[in-house]
Amino acid sequence: MSALQKSIMKSKLPPRCPRSYKQKLAPFGMSRCKNYQPESWKRFFHRTEDVETDGGTFRVYLTAEPDHPLRPRIVTLHGGGYSGLSWALFAEEVTYMVHCQVISIDIRGHGETQAKDPDDMSAETLVKDVEQVLQKLFGDEMPPLILVGHSMGGAIAVRAAHLPSLQHYVQGLVVIDVVEGTAMEALASMQSFLRGRPTHFKSIRHAIEWCVRSGQVRNVSSARVSMPSQIVNVETGLLATRELEDMSVDDSEADGAPLARADSIAEEDEPPESPDDLEPEPEPARVKHDEPVFVKPSEDLNVETGLLATRELEDMSVDDSEADGAPLARADSIAEEDEPPESPDELEEPEPARVKHDEPVFVKPSEDLNVETGLLATRELEDMSVDDSEADGAPLARADSIAEEDEPPESPDDLEPEPEPARVKHDEPVFVKPSEDLKRYKWRIDLSGTERHWAGWFRGLSALFLSAPAPRLLLLASIDGLDRELTVGQMQGKFQMQVLTRCGHAVHEDTPEEVARVVAAFALRHRLTSATESGENMNLVAAPGC
């Protein structure tokens, strides 16, 4: 259907229903409400471990131990700029389908890993890091391994599969959306792409929102987990995930009102995603018209008698109130108080008081008692003197001085000094709406500074992938991504290939359940593990190569 046909079809559609709520757009002009609240990794991984190697300390995320020590370990390696938490949703899905354990590593220079030389991002160094981490984790009891890598991590996985120390244990190799030919061609425009990204973010939620809206990750659930591990706090230098660990979920749930974050102010008036999300309005209280309504009395003292207002209710009787000409107010009499008069003649407008502008105006004090001192208000006037008022710098206000209050001062000396801002105790949390240019978070790694290593990551990748001794699986977001060498190898049946649609470059984050299903079927096809009870009901079948 052409664009012209689409416009004609749209013009024949009935008009949309008007919105019954006021829509307030958040940054980037979002049209519907989405949850950009960051989420902790603890829902997806069982534990973390910081592994000490010759290259530094590497953060490793692990799911629960499998039911048997010989079950395969799926070692996931992320792409450049991502982290080990980019595999969080995939780990949850694949362990639900087959018996295995997912081991997700923060590569050097990424996430919580603290390398001794973070600038050394060469392919040889990265492969050596993976080898040492696995040896530290398992030692001489190395279990079967399935190496899964995305983009840069895919290039590392392919090279690690050829290591003599790991070659015997690598039972499967999965590469996601990385091909030598297309990768080398994309390097020319990589710097332009990096310059187009924002350098700072005002909040974690702002970073998650950008991640989804820019298309880096199309799955908001995955971005909520992975994006905090890609940015650091400018002031503390710590990863944003550290802040999530410090936030107590139990406290916020106990109060029933989670702490409002600085960037959530603009989203308070956003419409709900569906009518079911609308909170029902409370029904108004029903009052019987045959019963009088009594207003809850104030707890203040009566200034004349010095008694509480509740004492007056005890002394009041229906006969007394009728004798005084003040019948009890009924529920249905409220609507009659504001009714307009029957004719304009009944409107009585009081004449305005005439005041001479050359004489000060003194308000007649009330004859009531001062509830604090017990003295008449006239006694206070006697105690006040002109000298005291002049000493305080506050002369009596004249009637003609009202119009002069808003006039500008004659000289800068007449300007009143601005009050100092309130000082806040440092032991109390302060939530302030930040300005638009506030730069609180930045990227964990400067990818533009690793340009000298880019070509080394992908050069010779196709040949190494085809020559790997383990079974091979290639997952792509588009069929156009194959280069000539892999096209020939695929036609010869040297590896299994699967193309997943409706996803971007981060295939495992955009469609984690589909990637997990393909990987689980791949492991079952080569008899590397068995399906769980839930996986058996899912009818996992390895899709044929395409």
Image (cartoon, rainbow, N blue to C red):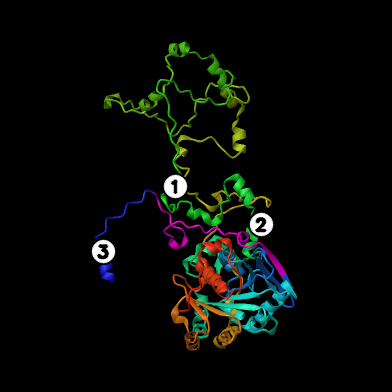
Q: Which residue is mark 2?
A: 246
Question: What residue is rendered at 48% in x and 35% in y?
Answer: 398
- CA gap between label 2 and label 1 equals 31 Å
Q: Which residue is mark 3?
A: 9
Q: How many marks?
A: 3
Range drawn in magenta: 21-50
- CA gap between label 3 and label 1 equals 32 Å
Residue 536 seen in render: yes
- CA gap between label 3 and label 2 equals 53 Å
Do callouts 3 and 2 mark residues in contact (Cβ within 8 Å)?
A: no
Label placed on residue 532: none
Q: Position of residue 303 (x, y in %)?
A: 56, 22
Residue 30: say if magenta: yes
Label placed on residue 278: 1
Classify residue 459 by image quadrant.
bottom right
Q: Position of residue 328 (x, y in %)?
A: 44, 18
